[in-house]
Image: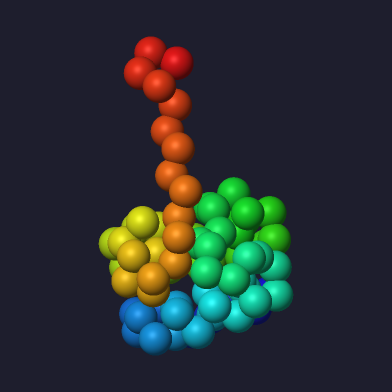
Amino acid sequence: MRAKPPGYWNDFAVLEQELLAFIAEHGNAGVMPTHTMLRSAGRGNLSQAMHQHGGIMAVAQRLGLMYDYRCKPPRY
């Protein structure tokens, strides 16, 4: 994957296009991929771009994607 030019990820439409293309190729339609899934596929740049736009849950909500967030119980 080539480095993107500065400011490439500032536009949410670019993130949406790249993320939906990734989901179509690697994921399940309508389901937000996890950060781990993105990084293992070599798309850590998408993970970082989501952080720039409010985080994975905010992006999933904005795009209408399901995101199954499970945190470990307290004192795990």
61 vs 66, left or right, is: left
Q: How many numbered marks have been drawn onto this rendered protein structure? A: 0
- The answer to whether residue 59 shows anywhere in this view is no
Q: Quadrant of the N terminus?
A: bottom right
Residue in view at x 59 percent, y 49 percent: 36
**Quarter of the view holding residue 65:** bottom left
**Residue 56 to residue 25: above or below:** above
- The answer to whether residue 26 shows anywhere in this view is yes
Q: Quadrant of the C terminus?
A: top left
**Quarter of the view holding residue 21:** bottom right
**Quarter of the view holding residue 73:** top left
Residue in view at x 45 percent, y 78 percent: 15
Colouring style: rainbow
Q: Position of residue 33 (x, y in %)?
A: 56, 59
Q: Position of residue 72 (x, y in %)?
A: 44, 26
Q: Position of residue 8 (x, y in %)?
A: 43, 83
Considering depth in this image, is 2 or 44 the residue closer to the camera? 44
**Residue 34 to residue 69: above or below:** below
Q: Position of residue 63 (x, y in %)?
A: 39, 74
Residue farthest toward the top in the current orientation of the protein:
75
Residue in view at x 52 percent, y 69 percent: 30
